[in-house]
Amino acid sequence: MSMRIGVIKEFEAENRVSIVPSSVKKLSKIGYEVYVETEAGISSNHSDQEYEEFGAIVTDRQQVSQSEIISSINFPAEELLREGQILICNADPFRHPSRVRSCNDKKITLISMDMIPRRLSRAQSMDVNSSQDNLAGYKSVLLGASLVSKGIPMMTTSAGTVRPAKVVVMGSGVAGLQAIATAKRLGAVVFASDVRITAAEQIESVGGRFIVVEGMEDFEDESGYAKPLTPDFITKVNETVCNVAADADLVITTARIFGRPAPVTIPADAVKKFKTGCVIVDMNADVGGNCELTVRDETITTDNGVVIVGKTNLPGTIPTTASMLFSNNITSFLSSLMTEEGFDLSESDDILVGAPADSDFHVQGMGGVLLCRDGSVHENQAKLSEVI
């Protein structure tokens, strides 16, 4: 028996689409029928005709919303959802518990792709956080470089030598490492920081120089995310890294803690000491910002001439590539749910239900992607139960 997947057109500010035409063929082969809302892929350069050529049924929103499975990038408008459906999206449940409550009330099975447990090797092909963060890190450097008032690489000309730009990347997870590599490819001298000691080797492998903070320990949890820091150590890290960044031409901030507001890595007082013309690209403007002065979705200039970019949804500015990668993640995930017997949300699948309830993963909220089912929060999501 086939399962019907409905691909909705995202809200106006979102240019990505959750499933691209090339994935439709793969999904159809394993037992899914794909219904796509008219012009769902238009902003990512995929026409309705292209979807139809790959076997999708392109129709209106009303018909798409009747599907057993709804696929989207972001949590959709609630009027699209009906009782008994399966919703696959990025729900960001710890910051938006009302979404989980809404799905409980409507007896909707919520599968939040941003909760994929990245520690599992077989889940890496489904990890939307990594695929989208990688693009965000890349685009943050291009965006910042376009606003810096000097050349990025070293140039030797008859008129004189231009020294390379100095770039500082704060935080070196997936996004940070891509930012370092991109800035290095542009010809910059790149310095980078992280609270995980293991990041030093990774930073150096892509061309960066690791900023050492005296007394540093390894603040990494088992899932690969940074742990919350003590207030004293936060101050020490901020001071050390901001001192290195004081004469930088471009600063990229990437520090993000799962399910929590972004930590402040550039206090307002530090910005006052940055040189005129410095550009700060804050990659976490959507969750409060790493720079204390960041304004969501605005680019501002401070009194001392520092430019602060608060652009959210950086992957959405590269919609064709971002959609392709997100679609590959979704396709890999949906393929894992289709067995010889048919579609199966097995509670023995550690991607779906995660680690045991007493594990550190569970406490950190990394208990798998299945959040609620049959009108109740999943039993392995007790930490989320406390939130909602």
Image: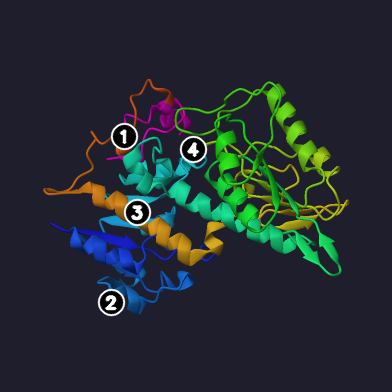
Give neighbour class at mark 3: few <14, some 14-19, many 20+ (Cα, 10 Å).
many
In which quadrant of the rendered image does the N terminus lie?
bottom left
Q: Earlier in the sequence, mark 1 or mark 3?
A: 3
Q: In the image, 70: left or right of 314? A: left
- Pointers 1 and 4 in contact (C-beta within 8 Å): no
Magenta-span inclusion, residue 382:
yes
- Measured in 3D between alpha carbons, the distance from the residue under mark 2 to the one under mark 4, in whole angstroms, is 39 Å
Q: Is residue 15 visible?
A: no
Decide which of 272, 211 is in the foreground and name it.
211
- Measured in 3D between alpha carbons, the distance from the residue under mark 2 to the one under mark 1, in whole angstroms, is 36 Å
- Measured in 3D between alpha carbons, the distance from the residue under mark 1 to the one under mark 3, in whole angstroms, is 17 Å
As helix, strand or loop, the secondary structure at mark 3 comes to helix
| Residue that label 2 marks | 53
| Residue that label 1 marks | 353
Q: Earlier in the sequence, mark 1 or mark 4?
A: 4
| Residue that label 4 marks | 94
Q: Earlier in the sequence, mark 2 or mark 4?
A: 2
| Residue that label 3 marks | 330
Which residue reaches farthest bottom? 49
Q: How far from the left and from the top, in percent, is residue 224? A: 48, 33
In percent of the image, x 60 and y 44: which residue is there?
287
